[in-house]
Amino acid sequence: MKINTDGVLIGGIVTANAPSRILDVGTGTGVIAMMLAQRFPGAFVDGVEIDASAASTAAKNFSSSPFASRLSVHTGDILTFESDFAYDLIISNPPFFVNDLKNPEARKRLARHADEDFFVGLIRKVSLLLNPSGECWLILPVKQAEELVVQAVLYKLFPKRIIHVHSDESKPEIRQVICFSFANAAPVHEDFYIYAAQGVYTDAYVSLLKDFFLAF
């Protein structure tokens, strides 16, 4: 499970007002969780990961990080995960190849693919774990993002902010970063571009991730 653009993008782009409890759903090897621990020094961050090997790696990464005392990983399915408290911020870069050809390698299949009812179960679980004033941030391909917005309404979660992610200004959007909350209001729409030219990142992308990438 290598570091990918989707993961670091949502880890850098999410905003929150001094959250004290954060949940990273599908934490993988823990990259997003550690980014959030760095960005929000007053927060305790829980990562949930269904793949035992990835969860073990996340635990090692957490213990080796400067934020070890504020990070914890839970091995298991988010749909059966229980917590004694609500979260101020829930974030996820979930699997999204619904009904696509399955990857023959089991672990990659688990990380990349989702059954049709996965997102319904995810958004339902978010509605149960999220603080009434909290926010949930997800990054998804456009089709899945639009479908999830419809499903989320059934659980009283509404899009507050939708960031349309493009490779560059000449390309259509390839991802949507959506911030959900329990407040029903018209969402704010924004565009975000990763490249200014071939092989050249935009100033916005560099600014977003300069605190995490040595190359920036």
Image (cartoon, rainbow, N blue to C red):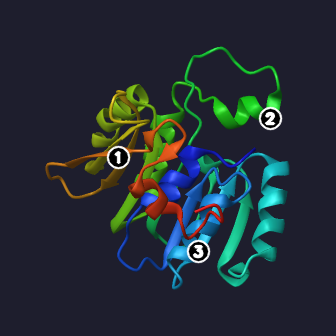
* SS for callout 1: strand
Residue at (80% x, 35% y) in the render:
107
Question: Which residue is under mark 2?
Answer: 107
Residue at (70% x, 84% y) in the render:
69
* SS for callout 3: helix
Q: Is residue 170 above or below residue 182?
A: above
Residue at (75% x, 71% y) in the render:
62
Q: Position of residue 66 (x, y in %)?
A: 71, 82
Quadrant (top left/top right/bottom left/bottom right) for the C terminus: bottom right
Q: Residues within 10 Å of mark 3 (few under 14, many from 20)?
A: many
Q: Is residue 112 above or below residue 6?
A: above
Instruction: Indicate which disc residue 37 carries.
Output: 3
Residue at (80% x, 75% y) in the render:
63
Q: Residues within 10 Å of mark 1 (few under 14, many from 20)?
A: many
The amino acid pointed to by label 3 is: Ala
Residue at mark 1 to residue at mark 2: CA–CA distance: 31 Å
The amino acid pointed to by label 1 is: Phe
View extreme (top): residue: 101
Instruction: Indicate which disc residue 192 carries.
Output: 1
Asked whether, in this view, residue 32 is left or right of residue 87, the answer is right
Q: Position of residue 81 (x, y in %)?
A: 62, 56
The amino acid pointed to by label 2 is: Arg
Q: Position of residue 172 (x, y in %)?
A: 34, 27
